[in-house]
Amino acid sequence: MRSGPGADRPVRAAVLRAAGDALVEHGFDHLDLADVARRAEVGKTTVYRRWGTVAGLVADLLTDMAEQSLPRADTGSLIGDLRANARLVQRTLVDPRQGALFRAVIVAATCDPRAAEALHRFYAIRIAEWAPCVEQAVRRAELPPGTDAAEVIRAVSAPLYYRMLVSGDPIDEAAADRAAEAAAAAAHAGVYTPAT
């Protein structure tokens, strides 16, 4: 039997894949650790011992998704970087598997504090990954000093999540580009600087 820190990587990968499949098929309310263990072809005790609860499993799934996310683009311009960010979000949300996973996790986060904490941590990681493109734009004098980089990045993805969760409008590249351009325009206008 394998032991050591790398020994459980295949087990974790199999369980997280199975959990993602189950979330896509049945949603958070019907996610069952025994079913996930069966799908992953691992023992139930392994799943219960390592993750303990459905919320713990969803939290680890989000951690894995954050770890697997693509690194930020560096196009050399603010608008290029923000478009790259918006298009990455757009592609993720329209992807049959990833989009369904995000919807299920967001639903879970509305009723489970651990899932909510994991979702907040996921987005904090992604915002921290992309914030430097705004900070670089400030250094290049493209944006006013003191621009809140995290707020600019949030402004890029917010309209796309609104389309997914509220309006049901298409989440296409044109919508992604508009979101990036609106965030850039607001940042140029000083909307994301401290009030004086």
Image (cartoon, rainbow, N blue to C red):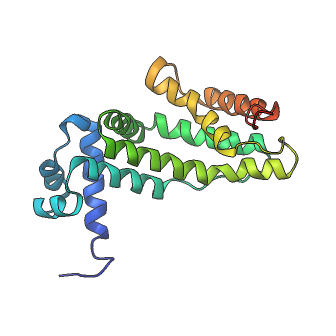
Q: Nearest the camera: 55 or 101?
A: 55
Q: Nearest the camera: 106 or 148?
A: 148
Name the image quarter holding residue 81.
top right
Q: Which residue sits at x=78%, y=30%? A: 185
Left or right, residue 34 beside residue 78: left
Percent coordinates x, y for residue 182 in the rendering: 71, 28
Report whether residue 53 is seen.
yes
Percent coordinates x, y for residue 130 in the rendering: 64, 50
Question: Would you place residue 142 above or below residue 40 in this image?
Answer: above
Q: Which residue sits at x=27%, y=71%? A: 8
Name the image quarter holding residue 74.
bottom right
Report whether residue 76 is seen.
no
Q: Which residue sits at x=27%, y=52%? A: 57
Percent coordinates x, y for residue 40 in the rendering: 20, 57
> Which image quadrant: the C terminus?
top right
> Which image quadrant: the N terminus?
bottom left
Left or right, residue 147 beside residue 31: right
Left or right, residue 96 beside residue 123: left
Residue projecting furthest to the right: 141
Q: Which residue sits at x=23%, y=58%? A: 51
Question: Would you place residue 34 above or below residue 175 in this image?
Answer: below
Percent coordinates x, y for residue 150 in the rendering: 64, 44
Q: Nearest the camera: 39 or 156?
A: 156
Question: What is the total number of numbered labels drawn onto the structure image?
Answer: 0
Q: Nearest the camera: 195 or 133?
A: 195
Left or right, residue 98 beside residue 195: left
